Amino acid sequence: MPLALYDTWSRTVRPFTPIRPGQVGMYCCGPTVYDHAHIGNLRTYLFEDVLRRTLIRNGYEVRHVVNITDVGHLTSDADEGEDKMEKGSRRTGESAWAIARHYTDAFVADWHALNLLEPSTWCRATDHIGEQIAFIGELEQAGYVYRTDDGLYFDTSKQDDYGYLARLDREGLQAGKRVSLGAKRNITDFALWKFSPPDVKRQMEWESPWGRGFPGWHIECSAMSAKYLGAWFDIHCGGEDHIAVHHSNEIAQTQAAHGTRLANFWMHGHFLTLDAQTKMSKSSGDFIRLQTLESRNVDPLAYRYLCLTAHYRSKLNFSWAALDAAQTALTRLRDHYLSWPEGGAIDNAFAARFDANVNEDLNLPRALAVVWELVKSDLPPATLKATLDSFDAVLGLGLRDWKPIVSDIPGDIEALLNERAQARTDKDWAKADRLRATLMTLGWKVEDGKEGQRATKIAMELA
């Protein structure tokens, strides 16, 4: 089945054809590095990683660009409040430059822990101030820029189709505005360059033809994507919260400067929720980091597996029970893979079914169902391993690299295991179950087989 993807611009699943034969340009909005990423943020990068792996499986060479927003993202999408980097600096007592480095390093560590493929290019906003100033200059020459006391703004009224990506009701927004526009002409207008307040010394500011200041959030992505991929490329990705403002503004800028909507496909991952309603966010306090999972002896790749169980365009409700189930499933898959011999050939029938689901707008839940049908099939073990290995090129679970932690069983754990073995001999099943639960809380999983019970440490690691 040929690859088909959902395009937010057209609101349809349509066949994917690259602009340049055999090559795909893909830009993904990265983090604003004023704080740690939470697992809701990371779900978006997991979806994008699966997309990239699927493109590679379909034979494409992918140029994957991810930005790091280390300046210009204000605390309000309405261009009010302070820069998040300056706010983070005040919160931590460190310089804005130092916290940018710290949280960038933390984000990259999370990236690697989730086995995400390294981008072709990481690009920082602060490394591309010149490109952003030049882009604003193009917009100014095209007549889309006006000046206020606090900066330069993009005039959205000059575009009849502004906000089409989000299907914005511009007249309704204008009529229903409840906040002061300040010097902005329209509620949807947005900052391109903010002037440094005359009585404030900012940590991050630069000279420009219009005065000393710093770029707006949206201009960085238009400028950097154009630099690395051109003004018309294949796929632009991000979270669903980017549709109404950030991505609509990127499109507006690029239409004004270059006459394109920037990307042929616009793709968006949906939220991770905590109680089936509340999206995970830093501002709400519902903030679970990847390290939170690791502190509970949960492998980061178990979270990756959990994300594979839901389609990227559906909300995924997070619960500890669901995560435990994902870890159990991942452990089973690893155990099977490890037990099978090398040297087999890929089963084409299973591979065709897997690819058909993945190519249907990344339907990973159905693809996982094919995986478990494969595992339970009566194919030769070497064939099972070769086929699952090929599937993992898309799943990204790192099955080939995984090894269980080799460790001796401590004396206290050995004593509990012996006590449980005796309980089973005595057919005291209730006691055996209680001891199994106790061992689980201590970090040991117990499985019963023909040769008796087997204990393995729950915490796993990549080799």
Image: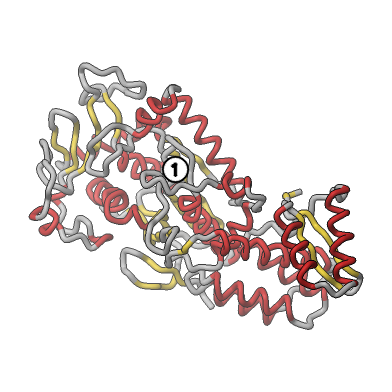
Say whether residue 46 is left or right of residue 401: left
**Can you tell which quarter of the image residue 150 is in?**
top left
Question: Would you call the spot at circle 1 few (<14 residues within 10 Å), some (14-19), or many (20 or more)?
Answer: many
Name the kind of residue labelled 1 in the image. Answer: Pro
Element type where label 1 sits in the image: loop
Say whether residue 195 is left or right of residue 231: left
* Image quadrant occupied by the N terminus: bottom right
Q: Position of residue 289 (x, y in %)?
A: 52, 46
Q: How many numbered marks appear?
A: 1
Query: At x 85% / y 49%, what residue is drawn?
Result: 412
Q: Position of residue 278 (x, y in %)?
A: 38, 58
Query: At x 50% / y 40%, what residue is drawn?
Result: 122
| Nearer to the camera, 158 or 85 | 85
Q: Is residue 289 visible?
A: yes
| Nearer to the camera, 302 or 188 | 302
Q: Position of residue 418 (x, y in %)?
A: 89, 60
Query: At x 30% / y 49%, what residue is drawn?
Result: 246
| Nearer to the camera, 227 or 220 | 220
Say whether residue 324 is left or right of residue 433: left
Say above or below: 204 vs 251: above
Residue carrying label 1: 31
Say whether residue 129 is left or right of residue 404: left
Q: Is residue 65 visible?
A: no
Q: Position of residue 383 (x, y in %)?
A: 79, 74
| Nearer to the camera, 262 or 329 | 329
Q: How is the image coloured?
A: secondary structure
**Can you tell which quarter of the image residue 454 is in?**
bottom right
Say above or below: 309 vs 31: below
